[in-house]
Amino acid sequence: MNTSRFVRAALVALTGVAVAAPKAALADIKDYEFQLVEPMLNKGERVFAVKLLNKATGKVVPDAVIFAIRLDMEPDGMEDMDTRIVAAPASEPGVYGFKANFSMAGRWRLSLGAKVQGETGTVANKLIIKAQK
């Protein structure tokens, strides 16, 4: 009999702990977005940066895995006018640097895809960079 009381008491205690334990707030992949650090650049070969933000907290997200990158002039009707883009060092965590040749003045579309650690799904954004003379 003492054993069954002990088992019941242990079950009640564990149930109370499970109910009272704080639940981890999981973010939705839609809570993340890229933002340009500088939306306007001079034409030519340039280094630029984007921040990955958690919109719910306003904090930058370090250590994302960026796997899809494209830079083209689709906003000016020239989607076939694209340029090579490579990763470049960034100044701080949550900021991602890139290097590209903005060969013409105009609007360039930056397409990015990334995986955020601990989240399911892909962050995908298209940003507009204006290259001026």
Image (spheres, rainbow, N blue to C red):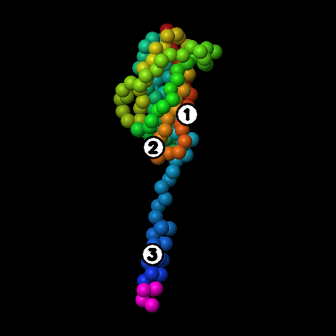
Q: Mark 1 or mark 3, which is nearer the start of the sequence? A: 3
The amino acid beneath tag 2 is: Gln
Q: How far apart are labels 3 and 1 at the CA level?
A: 45 Å
Please state which of residues 53 and 117 is positioned toward the viewer in this rendering.
117
Q: Residue at left 53%, top 45%?
A: 120
Identify the main secondary structure in magenta.
Answer: helix
Element under label 3?
Answer: helix
Residue 2 among magenta residues:
yes
The amino acid beneath tag 3 is: Ala
Name the residue beneath numbered marker 1. 124
Name the residue beneath numbered marker 2. 117
Residue 41 in view here:
no
Please state which of residues 48 and 88 is positioned toward the viewer in this rendering.
88
Residue 110 vs 118, above or below: the answer is: above
Name the residue beneath numbered marker 3. 13
Q: Residue furthest right?
A: 77
Which quadrant of the rendered structure holds the N terminus? bottom left
Residue 89 in view here:
yes
Q: How far apart are labels 3 and 2 at the CA level?
A: 34 Å
Specify the segment rendered in magenta. 1-5
Q: Is residue 62 left or right of residue 79?
A: left
Residue 97 vs 33, above or below: the answer is: above
Element under label 1?
Answer: strand
Q: Residue at left 52%, top 23%?
A: 70
Q: Residue at left 52%, top 47%?
A: 27
